[in-house]
Image (cartoon, rainbow, N blue to C red):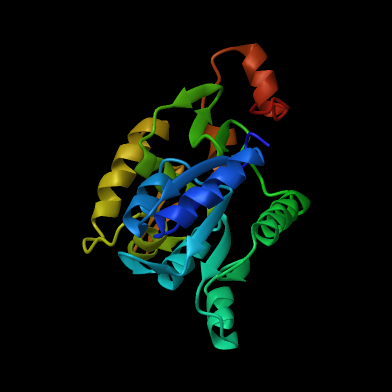
Amino acid sequence: MSLISITIIEGNPHLRSLLGWHLQQAGYQVQQVATIQQARKIFYHRQPTLVILDSDLPDGDGIEFCYWLHQQRQSLILMLSAKITEKDVVQGLNAGADDYIKKPFGMQEFLSRVEALIRRMRVTCAPLYLDYGDLKIDLVHRRVQLKGDYVDLTPQEFSLLYVLAQAEGDPLSRSELLQKAWPDAIDNPRTIDTHVLSLRKKIELDPRQPSLIQTVRNVGYRFNPEIIQSEIPIPSPVLELEHSGRSSRTMV
């Protein structure tokens, strides 16, 4: 249960505290925030397993933020709302919510819905990390391991690498990367270039001739993990044998 992290985004301090207390008693790790701005900061330091999201927040529309969360494809979403018409429920679910609870609600129903969502996550076997042989991306602790050594990435560099890797080789435009990998709206797409340059210096064999994060002319960038197996030199015969045979080591 210790790996199950839940973030509550609720403007009502009394309800937020009550939900947090019950979830902690059930054994979950809980973070509590009151605004979308605070939630974005938490999200880019550690993606929660489940987000409890109020549809009406002090600094923005919970429905719009739900859509953004859904695009990240990293957290389940349970929406809480005082809006109870069928149209409201449909809007919340279409925005990406995995479940929708109408206010007011009973605590037993709330906890049961949380447990049902967690069970769904376990059944679908959502990966805890992406494994590309010599490159591993740990989605729980937001760490990257290259040939057994951890690479020191900033939270933003990690998010950028994760979004590129998630595209499975398809090129992404700068606008798409800004939308999917940045916590706040940024007007300058060239911000992507600066972060890609920094990321390349940390994970490329030759940052001046990048092969892992490739530039796609007139489009943007693409992730090419196959190159890891063929171009990163191995310093010893023992490691070379392990490399060519696809190491069976797993990240703990």
* Residue 72 locus on image (x, y percent): 49, 58
Image position of 96 with respect to 153: above or below: below
* Residue 252 locus on image (x, y percent): 65, 26
Q: Give the total number of marks visible in the rendering.
A: 0
Q: Is residue 169 visible?
A: no
In which quadrant is the N terminus drawn? Answer: top right
Q: Can residue 113 be seen in this view?
A: yes
* Residue 8 locus on image (x, y percent): 49, 52
Residue 230 or 64: which is nearer the viewer? 64
* Residue 156 locus on image (x, y percent): 36, 44
Q: What residue is at 64 percent from the left and 13 percent from the top?
A: 237
- Which residue lies most toward the left here? 188
Q: In which quarter of the image is residue 12?
A: bottom left
Residue 189 or 21: which is nearer the viewer? 21
Image position of 247 with respect to 3: above or below: above
73 relative position to 60: left or right: right
Image position of 201 with respect to 20: above or below: above
Q: What residue is at 36 percent from the left and 38 percent from the top?
A: 200
Image position of 238 with respect to 7: above or below: above
Q: What residue is at 55 percent from the left and 51 percent from the top?
A: 19
